Amino acid sequence: MQSESSGAFRARIHRGAQQIGGSCIELEAGGQRILLDLGLPLDAADVSDALLPDVEGLRSDHPGLNAIVISHGHGDHWGLLPVCRPGIPVVMGAATARILSAAAPFVPNSFVPSVSQHLSDRTVLQIGPFRITPYLVDHSAYDAYALQIEACGRHLFYSGDIRAHGRKAALFERLVSKPPERIDTMLMEGSSLGRLNEHDRFENEDAIEARLAESFGRPGFVLISASAQNIDRLVSIYRACKRTGRTLLLDLYAMEILRATGNPNLPDIGWPNLSVYVPEYQRRHIARNQRFDLLEPYKSARIFREHIAEIADKAVMLFRPAMARDLDLGHLWDNARAIWSQWDGYLQAGPGAKLKDDLLERGIPLAVVHTSGHASIADLKRLASALNPERLVPIHTFHGDRFSDYFDNVTRRADGEWWDV
């Protein structure tokens, strides 16, 4: 790829200029380099070192690669870390590191990161020639950051994944009201382009909570499929349960994720309208790996399968396909209904499509109650206007060609192309 760089402070996107997911940006100044994110592409069949971008130091030792900085805990931004050579310094939020560690006993392709430094809101880090200022942002991943990077007198701002309609919307308002000054290049995500019209807005989490409460107000056992790492959504589900007098049944995985945040304001043992159910597949996993320590904190709040039927009409279960056998054994399908509270694109193929078909075969109705983890076009325009970059470069989008319809000073870059910040 032909370079448009003189070599002072330069950048290149390895993945993201023409797709959502698999994000990776390489920055270089004075012969030293860092990566911003190292994500697994959303269409990848498996985690493989063959997917690593062509970056010196990822596969073998190279003194110029100083660190990999992870903006947040979604796999399409960190998922290739496990196949890098050991010893590369990794930087991420402290809660992100705890959540990844808590998830490790429960998920395939798990990863317990060894973190050299932590991101913290507006706390400057110096890594080689790079001065990094993290900005805590609103996103469906907990502990997500946008990043400002200064080197050689130039300033780059990377939005990461961002929105303005979640439970942390005040963080977006703070960013646009007190933006960093003099941004030369802004890498801004554009996930909503192609999904939303310019003047439309996504529902906020309060609206999602209200829709869930309306559904929970009707009788019947409710199964809700949502990511346990979408903390905003778990809070909405829990609050809707409280409003309707229902008990929320969370599994060990969800409880461990909530506790890993370290946030005392999130649902925990001893809170009303909350019980812990350990599904059969998790019980087997715990026994196989001798991880009985995972059960210990939740003894006082556990509910067992044989007792769920007694409260099913006033219960909501955080559900995933592996729990279907538990419902079979507990005879819990009668008068049940399901809610999908994730991106509806996952229902078109893969496990989501299979779940949809399985529910249809059982005669279980499935409703979609969800809002995006990404900013609307209107909010992206607010962000771009507030930061007023000299150049705006599209990333994390399938529609980079449409950025010029909505934003000023757009410069498109190709994957693999070096360019001056």
Image (cartoon, rainbow, N blue to C red):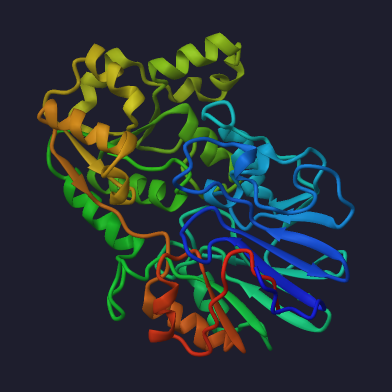
* Left/right of residue 81 with respect to residue 15 in the rendered view: right
Asked whether residue 141 is in view, the answer is yes
x and y percent of residue 316 in the render? 27, 35
Residue 220's place in the image compared with 347, above or below, is: above
Q: Where is residue 392? Give x, y as percent.
A: 56, 81
> Compared to 194, does 143 lie above or below?
above
Q: Residue at x 40, y 70 (%)?
A: 399
Residue at 67% across, 85% down: 184
Q: On the image, which quarter does residue 304 sit in?
A: top left
- Quarter of the figure with the N terminus: bottom right
Point out residue 298 in the picture as x, y percentages from the top left corner.
Answer: 50, 24
- Residue 124, given in percent of the width and then of the height, sits at 78, 68
Q: Quadrant of the C terminus?
A: bottom right
Q: Residue at x 13, y 38 (%)?
A: 365
The residue under the point 78% across, 53% down is 56
Q: Quadrant of residue 157?
A: bottom right
